[in-house]
Amino acid sequence: MPPSKLKNFSPAQSVRVCDHPECDSEGEFRAPKSPHDLDSYFWFCLDHVRAYNSTWNYFDGMSQNDIERFQKSAVTWHRPTWPFATDSRKGAARDFSPDRDFFGSFRDDYGVLWGEDDVTVVDESGQRRRITSEERRALAELNLDSDADLQQIKDRYKELVKKFHPDANGGSKKAEERLKAVNQAYGFLLSSGYT
């Protein structure tokens, strides 16, 4: 600071007084004056900024539709957005699947968007379904292919439980471990909504 400015400086000038009426404490904490003027501040002491914040409502005076519009816009930081990858023939979003070149020039050969071990199968209703590598491992534990349906999974599970149950194998630890793996695979397939 230049010496000419130092002679008029006093520490008392740098202390803000709380903006709350009848308060002489130091105003250390800033609070916006209104939702429409977020760059202008009140300066309050700790007690008064707490009281001010407890009554602050950014959405005060807005209708429910205005609030919902603001919240929806806040998801994208109030920036404009456009639909992604629409199909001009159908007017709907294109089907994203690992084996489809959905832009005409973009493919996921290295498994960046989808796991490289993921497979797409077509079920009996003609619907395409992506099978994850975890689901494939669980099916392999049950000695099933990726096109197995729920009934085949249940039948194979019953068959393997009978085969590896400790009572049928004289308490063999190997059979017990295999049964645990079969139970985990079956539970995973049911909980993942495989079918």
Image: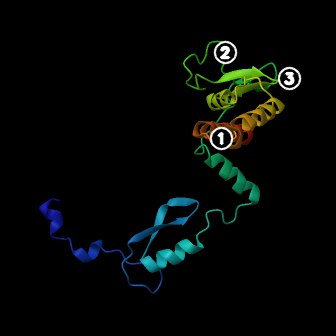
Q: Hey, what amino acid is under mark 2?
A: Asp
Residue nearest the observer in this picture, 180 or 83: 180
Q: Secondary structure at mark 1?
A: loop
The residue at the point 66 percent across, 66 percent down is 60
Q: Hey, what amino acid is under mark 3?
A: Glu
Q: CA distance from mark 2 to mark 3?
A: 24 Å
- What residue is pinned by disc 3? 124
**At which x and y percent is residue 151?**
83, 32
Relative to 146, is 117 on the left or the right? left
Could you tell me if the residues under marks 1 and 3 are in contact, i.e. CB atoms within 8 Å?
A: no
Q: Give the residue at the far top of this rendering.
A: 105
Above/below status of 22 relative to 143: below
- Graded by Cα atoms within 10 Å as few (under 14), some (14 to 19) or many (20 or more), the crowding at tag 2 reads few
Nearer-N-terminus badge (2/3): 2
Above/below status of 6 relative to 143: below
The answer to which quarter of the image holds residue 168 is top right
Q: Nearer the viewer, mark 1 or mark 2?
A: 1
Nearer-N-terminus badge (1/3): 3
Nearer-N-terminus badge (1/2): 2
The residue at the point 82 percent across, 22 percent down is 90
- What residue is pinned by disc 1? 170
Residue nearest the observer in this picture, 112 or 77: 112
The answer to which quarter of the image holds residue 130 is top right
Q: Secondary structure at mark 3?
A: loop
**At which x and y percent is residue 30?**
44, 68
Q: Nearer the viewer, mark 1 or mark 3?
A: 1
Q: Give the residue at the far front of this rendering.
A: 170
Relative to 45, is 60 on the left or the right? right
Relative to 91, is 68 on the left or the right? left
The disc placed on residue 101 is 2
